[in-house]
Image: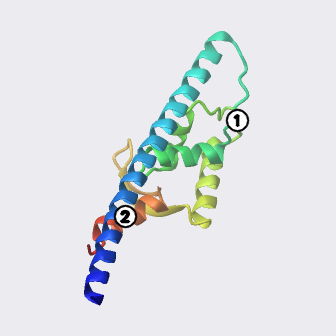
Amino acid sequence: MTDEIYRKAFEQAKADLEKSMERRKRAESEAFAAFSESTQLRRTVAALAALCGENVEDSMGLTEAVRTVFRMTNAAWLSVKDMKAHVEALGVGLSDLKNAEASVMSVLNRLTTAGELQASQKREKTVAGQIVQVKVWKSAQAAEAETTADDEIPF
């Protein structure tokens, strides 16, 4: 009798887990769609504001823009130059900063210290043909997801 109770509990737990995973997948998909839509609209508003000569108050600061870029490019390693280009593509103005790359680097290092990002080095070829080491960053969640997947649950 006890084995039968455990078997029923096991089957119920497996079914509940499957439902929960599906619900999580739908929620993540909906959140990603809303995020993508709001990002595209932010770009549109910024571009149209420039064409109309309007000054749109940018509610997104540099730190939030960097986080947004990492959400959009979930599995990519990005350099400071890449990040700067992505942030500008979001419509976040960097022209008022004295040294935009230094500001972006500061945010990346701060988020790395806080555990939100992971830093590494990669080799990159310069325009002059020299090979140099470049610091790159990746979302800590994306890096963790590479090493641990939900499929590793032993069910």
Question: Residue 88 appears at what percent x and percent y?
Answer: 56, 33
Residue at (44%, 63%) from the top-left corner?
A: 120
In the image, residue 13 above or below residue 62: below
Residue at (31%, 68%) from the top-left corner?
A: 14
User: Which residue is the site of mark 2?
Assistant: 16
Q: Quadrant of residue 101?
A: top right
In the image, residue 140 above or below residue 100: below
User: Which residue is the site of mark 1?
Assistant: 59
In the image, residue 54 above or below residue 104: above
Q: Secondary structure at mark 1?
A: loop
Q: Amino acid at mark 2?
A: Asp
Residue 89 shows up from this direction: no
Q: Nearer the viewer, residue 13 or 124?
A: 13
Residue 155 shows up from this direction: yes
Among the two numbered marks 1 and 2 on one chain, the one whose residue lies closer to the N terminus: 2
Are there few (<14), some (14-19), or many (20+) residues within 10 Å of tag 2?
few
